[in-house]
Image (tube, helix red, strand yellow):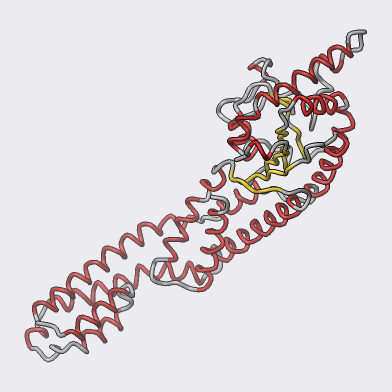
Amino acid sequence: MLITSATPQELIDWFHVKQEKQRIMCVMLAPELEDQQKLKDLILGFSAADAVLGGEVAFILLDPTGSSAVGLDRGLGEVGAFSGVALPLRDTTSFRDLTDEWEHHRDHVAKTSARGMARFVPDFMQIFNVEPVDLPCLCLVVHGVDESIVLSLDKEWTTEHLKELLQKIRIIVDGTPNFKKEISSIAGLLPKSLERIQDLVNSIGAKTSQISKILDQMLRRYDGSAEDRRMVVSYVAQGCQGRKILEDVLARFSFKESEKLHRDEQILRLLRLADELDSRRAPLIELQRGGLFIPSVTEQAQHWIESRDKLFGELESLLPGKQIATTRINRNQLTLIKSALELVNTSGEVVGKAVAAYEWIIKLVGKGG
């Protein structure tokens, strides 16, 4: 890709989540003059590099002198770029020219692009958390993943060594899944029934608070003992679970024989609230037992993480390197599903599947952040 108008962060964000053609984008950070010459030589021999990269890997070249009309849309929409896959110079005027000036034109484009990349190195260094001592390096932006990889290059790197590295990257990427589609699939698992969870949990919380308040008033009104208070604290702490448990608590109060208690209308109100709590918890219990939502989230989130870790592990085995978070766009897309699982997980009806799903989503959302 030859991008002519975009800030480095816009370019990174766009590749992470908007573009659909490549799985990995290579950003070369090599600003020294000898590095620029090597990069220029790589561009002049673009056909060989293009063949090495294939259709899954992009190698970005930036030209600061280019027209904004050929640049990246500021809204992270479609990209205006020269057609092609990796080093798409074949369709530019300078590289199509068949006149006697063709060699001069190609040399000019290659030199300008090499200088353009050097000019943007400081901006990319900040994005990829690269220190001067880390240069030169090759940064790999993975489509659909918020993290990128920085691979350290030898100070004496050559274009041939770089092409060998790019070929290894291509082989690794060939079997890489479309992470963006997998993230969208996970986010799309939220069924309509989950839209009721917030209302249900709010209602459950309100009624639990009412029960707690009434029990506290009763303890004060009937001068409840320390054991009475311990039972109430335990019952409330466990979410006021079920009418039968409440009846057991009432039957064990030290003042259970009080005639005034038997006439107390608050007893009926407590039992009614307990029944209402049970009815509101039923949909949450059914949601967890139904096997429609939570197990699917668990399975897909686990698959996403395992696939991502496998890809990153293979890429990091090529050269010394590190992972760095370069965007939060995908992570932000999972906010709704994470919130929904938190509600299920804290509703007082925790089961194994909900816990497992929540743990995988936490890993998914928290990676690199």
Q: Residue at x 85, y 38 (%)?
A: 163
Q: Farthest bottom residue?
A: 257
Q: Compare residues 49 and 21 and report the one nearer the observer.
A: 49
- Residue 285: image quadrant is bottom left
Q: Position of residue 132 (x, y in %)?
A: 65, 36
In this picture, residue 12 sits left or right of residue 339: right
Q: Position of residue 62 (x, y in %)?
A: 70, 24
Q: Position of residue 153 (x, y in %)?
A: 76, 41
Q: Farthest top residue?
A: 100
- Residue 213's place in the image compared with 337, above or below, is below
Q: Position of residue 160 (x, y in %)?
A: 88, 36
Number of marks in the rendered image: 0
Q: Compare residues 332 and 278 and report the one nearer the observer.
A: 332
Rendered-image quadrant of the N terminus: top right
- Residue 313's place in the image compared with 66, above or below, is below
- Residue 222's place in the image compared with 129, above or below, is below
Q: Compare residues 310 and 282 and report the one nearer the observer.
A: 310
Q: Residue at x 14, y 75 (%)?
A: 266
In this picture, residue 276 sits left or right of residue 108: left
Q: Compare residues 210 and 366 and report the one nearer the observer.
A: 366
Q: Residue at x 71, y 28 (%)?
A: 31
In this picture, residue 97 sits left or right of residue 34: right
- Residue 124: image quadrant is top right
- Residue 224: image quadrant is bottom left
Q: Residue at x 21, y 75 (%)?
A: 270
